[in-house]
Amino acid sequence: MADCTDSIVKNIVSNCTTSGSGGLEVKAWVFRRDELVVTYDGTIPNKITDLALGQGLKCYTVTGVKKLLNAGHDIVVADDRPNKYTHYFALQQFETLAEDIKNVDQMDDVVIFVESKDKNTTGDGVFIGYGVKKGLWKSTDTQRANDINGARNLEFVSLAGQEEPYSRYILLAPETVPADGTGYANTLALLVSLETAQA
C-alpha cells in the first residue's frame, strides 16, 4: 500500500550520472527529540530547512573513524496500512570512563543527522536525518571484552509501530542568495552552531 496522499512525481535515473560511492563522514549530530524544533519545507514534506533548540540546550556529536558509523532504513509493509520506514543508526563506543558509560546508557529517543560522503553542488541530499518525528531507540547494546577490541556495539532504530513516514529526511538550509551555491555551507554551519548551548 502506498502513502495515503503522495505519488511519484518525477523520473528515476539510476545510471552513471547519479551513481554514488556511499559512505558517511565520521561526524554525526545527536539531538534529544523532545528538545528539537524542526521547520519543514512547504512543498516537500521530508525536506527540513531549519533546526532550533531552546535556551541553554545543545546537540552533541558522535565522532567515529573510517566506516565506524552507519545509518539507513528498512521499509515496513502491511496489507492494511500505509508504508512506513524503520530508521537505523549504528556506532561503536570506545570510551570507558564512568561518565561516558552513563551518557550512552541514557541515549534514547534521539534524532540523528549524518553527512554523506557523496556531495553535490547544492548540498541537497548530503545531510540526512533519522528518527526526526518518532525518535530512535537502542535495539542492540552489546560489549564483550575479547571481541572488536572490547568496544561497545550500539544500534538505534525506530520503535515498532512508530516508524517514520519517509525513508530519510533531508536537511538543507536556504542559500544566502538564491542559486548562489551556499546551501551545503549554510547547512553545515547550522549544525555546528547547535553544538553550543543556545543563548
Image (tube, rainbow, N blue to C red):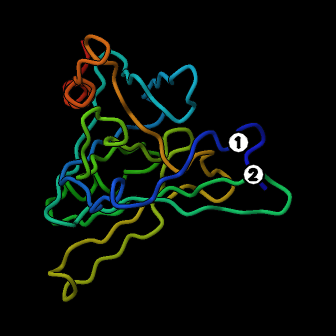
Q: Mark 1 points at which residue?
A: 7
Judging from the image, what secondary structure is the residue with disc 1 in? loop
**Hey, which quadrant is residue 180 in on the image?**
top left
Give the amino acid type for the residue marked by disc 1 in the picture: Ser
Residue in the foreground of this view, choosing between 178 and 140: 178
Circles 1 and 2, Cβ within 8 Å, touching? The answer is yes
**Residue 62 tag number:** none
Q: Earlier in the sequence, mark 1 or mark 2?
A: 2
Q: Which residue is drawn at 83% across and 63% down?
A: 79
Q: Is 34 displayed left or right of 104 in the figure?
A: right
Against 149, is 121 above or below?
above
Q: Is 103 displayed left or right of 110 in the figure?
A: left
Q: Position of residue 153 (x, y in %)?
A: 30, 71
Could you classify mark 2 by the number of other residues whose Cα lies within 10 Å: few (under 14), some (14-19), or many (20 or more)? few
**Hey, which quadrant is residue 95 in on the image?**
bottom left
Against 41, is 122 above or below?
below
Q: Which residue is drawn at 19% across and 30% down?
A: 192
Q: Position of residue 88 (x, y in %)?
A: 45, 59
- What whole-number distance in Å separates the C-alpha atoms at marks 1 and 2? 8 Å
Against 143, is 168 above or below?
above
Q: Residue at x 30, y 55 (%)?
A: 104
Please identify, in this view, whether the residue under mark 1 or under mark 2 is nearer the observer: 1
Residue in the foreground of this view, choosing between 10 and 163: 10
Q: Position of residue 54 (x, y in %)?
A: 37, 18
Residue furthest to the bottom in view is 146
Give the amino acid type for the residue marked by disc 2 in the picture: Ala
Residue in the foreground of this view, choosing between 157 and 47: 47
Task: State which quarter of the image contains the C terminus.
Answer: top left
Q: Mark 2 points at which residue?
A: 2
Residue in the foreground of this view, choosing between 169 and 90: 169
Judging from the image, what secondary structure is the residue with disc 2 in? loop
